Image: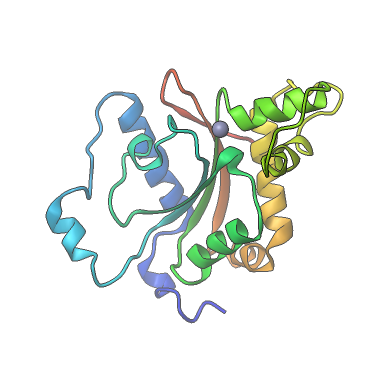
Amino acid sequence: MFSNAPDPRSRPTPSQALQWLLDGNARFASGRPQRPHQDDAHRRALTGGQHPHAVVLACSDSRVSVEILLDQGFGDLFVVRTAGHVLDRSVVASVEFAVAQLGVSVALVLGHESCGAVAAAQRYLAGGHELPGSMPALVEGVREHLDPEDPSRDAVSRHVRGTISELLAGSTLVREAVQEDLLAVAGGVYGLADGRITLVDR
Ligand SMILES: [Zn+2]
């Protein structure tokens, strides 16, 4: 199944890859980013192919700029973003592509404080109006992860955990990569004010 992925011996372990992300976020949040892999030479060196070490599934929110807040550069991250990091088949397939074809070692689901998609789901559960167009699909993808008794309780971290559970339930390929110790799946909540990611306890 992983025949097209890079040689596992040449890629970081799942815990190494997660640590690279956390170290990058710590550099960013402390105001000392290194801005690695962002120069012209590195960009040109990647024209023959990509070997990212992580797939990040994040919210599309304009304040959650993934490469910046993780202090990474060209070729480091395979990023999938939807509003509220809501899953659908294409999103799951994109994560699977990163795992099976690119050989990433970690999948990070990244939610954030003040997420509009989470707020919309909370309003829906409180009896608010439905959103127009196709946007109810976003509410649908969030609300089932919230506490029905108290939709405000730990909403963002619950939604991150729920997204991870849904991703694992929806992808045999991702589950097998985890079982084979080729992949770690982690969740985090990004703080808009302090710039720090807090890992979500699973
Ligand atoms: Zn959001």
User: As drawn, is 63 to the left or to the right of 182?
Assistant: left
Note whether residue 33 is visible. yes
Residue 8 x, y percent position in the rendering = 43, 71
User: As drawn, is 53 to the left or to the right of 82?
Assistant: left
Tell me which image quadrant ligand 1 sits in: top right
Name the one closer to the observer, 23 or 63.
63
Q: Residue pushed farthest front?
A: 133
User: Which color scheme does this rendered protein use?
Assistant: rainbow
Q: How many marks?
A: 0
Say which quadrant the N terminus sits in. bottom right
Residue 72, image quadrant: top left
What residue is drawn where x is 77% and y is 26%?
A: 129
What residue is drawn where x is 69% and y is 67%?
A: 172
Note whether residue 202 is visible. no
Name the one closer to the observer, 17 or 194.
194
Residue 147 x, y percent position in the rendering = 80, 29
Name the one closer to the observer, 141 or 184.
141
Name the one closer to the observer, 13 or 74.
74
User: As drawn, is 54 to the left or to the right of 178?
Assistant: left
Whether 96 is drawn above or below 201: the answer is below
What residue is drawn where x is 65% and y is 60%?
A: 89
What residue is drawn where x is 43% and y is 29%?
A: 63
Residue 159 x, y percent position in the rendering = 68, 36
Whether 187 is drawn above or below 102: the answer is above
